[in-house]
Image (cartoon, rainbow, N blue to C red):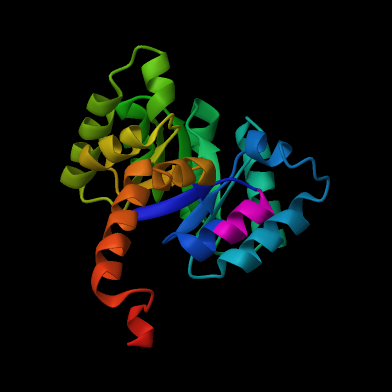
């Protein structure tokens, strides 16, 4: 399983990387625009510095035509590094660009996937990650769990070197659902992870443990014994 962050906020990234078992980070134009920074590539390089080269960085294109996507992909790799994953929506033009990039040695993450056929085509074209939008599917009355399961089954049967990434979540239950559906990774906003760890039952359990400990050992902790 891989846990990716879905943010471009430097403070949140630093905090999350120091707390959670983060394997990488994804961005998109909407996420980046929230930071109100004009220096796009310096921001991406700063994120890369925090992540290190052992974690994946996924940066999304803005152009929608194949030629434009390829130009942006070249610029992204030139200004960040050759390990970066080029996030590309699976439209007709995007699929064409994915195939060309894959043949030329680019790492590609296919995104904006709502159907199994989109995922299958992107995998066949050479994408290494497939980002399926769970909650957005639900909002469109699409059976998200079925799409995840059928896509995972298709990838497994094909033997293609490709991972399914669950994206677009409203709550942690949806995250656990996609892992059960066969996803190998998820990309989650740091705020959602923090909400999951803020469960009051955790604090109650810890308080009870400490009260029981003090009945025997008083205020000494284990390091003081």
Q: Name the residue at the bottom extreme.
A: 225
Q: Which of 195 and 206 is in front in this view?
A: 206
Can residue 182 be seen in this snapshot? no
Quarter of the picture containing the C terminus is bottom left
Indicate yes or no whether the magenta region holds residue 37: no
Quarter of the picture containing the N terminus is bottom left
Can residue 85 be seen in this snapshot? yes
Q: Is residue 131 above or below residue 51?
A: above
Helix, strand or loop: magenta stretch:
helix
Residue at 44% from the left image edge and 29% from the top image edge = 170
Q: Position of residue 219 (x, y in %)?
A: 38, 74
Q: Position of residue 29 (x, y in %)?
A: 66, 36
In the rendered view, does 17 fall on the left or right side of 146? right
Q: Where is residue 111 in the image (x, y as percent from the top left)?
A: 47, 36
Quadrant of residue 213 in the image? bottom left
In the rendered view, does 63 fall on the left or right side of 221? right
Residue at 34% from the left image edge and 38% from the top image edge = 175
Q: Which of 146 and 187 is in front in this view?
A: 187
In the rendered view, does 213 fall on the left or right side of 72? left
Residue at 30% from the left image edge and 69% from the top image edge = 214
Q: Name the residue at the top extreme.
A: 141
Region of the chain picked out in magenta, as a range: 9-15
In the rendered view, does 103 fall on the left or right side of 219? right
Q: Is residue 20 above or below residue 144?
A: below
- Count of labels shown? 0
Q: Which of 219 and 86 is in front in this view?
A: 219
């Amino acid at each position: 399983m891989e846990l990716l962050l879905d943010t471009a906020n430097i403070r949140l990234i630093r905090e999350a990387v120091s707390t959670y078992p983060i394997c990488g980070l994804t961005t998109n134009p909407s996420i980046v625009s929230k930071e109100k920074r004009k220096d796009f590539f310096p921001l991406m390089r700063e994120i890369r510095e925090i992540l290190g080269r052992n974690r994946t960085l996924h940066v999304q294109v803005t152009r929608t035509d194949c030629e434009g996507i390829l130009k942006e992909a070249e610029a992204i790799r030139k200004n960040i590094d050759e390990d970066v994953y080029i996030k590309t929506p699976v439209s007709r033009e995007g699929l064409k660009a994915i195939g060309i990039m894959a043949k030329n040695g680019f790492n590609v993450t296919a995104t904006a996937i709502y159907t199994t056929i989109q995922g299958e085509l992107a995998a066949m074209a050479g994408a290494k990650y497939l980002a399926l939008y769970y909650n957005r599917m639900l909002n469109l009355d699409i059976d998200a769990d079925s799409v995840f399961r059928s896509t995972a089954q298709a990838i497994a049967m094909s033997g293609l070197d490709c991972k399914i990434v669950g994206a677009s979540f409203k709550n942690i239950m949806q995250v656990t659902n996609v892992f059960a559906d066969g996803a190998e990774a998820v990309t989650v906003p740091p705020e959602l992870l923090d909400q999951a760890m803020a469960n009051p039952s955790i604090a109650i359990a810890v308080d009870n443990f400490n009260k029981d400990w003090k009945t025997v050992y008083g205020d000494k902790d284990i390091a003081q014994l």
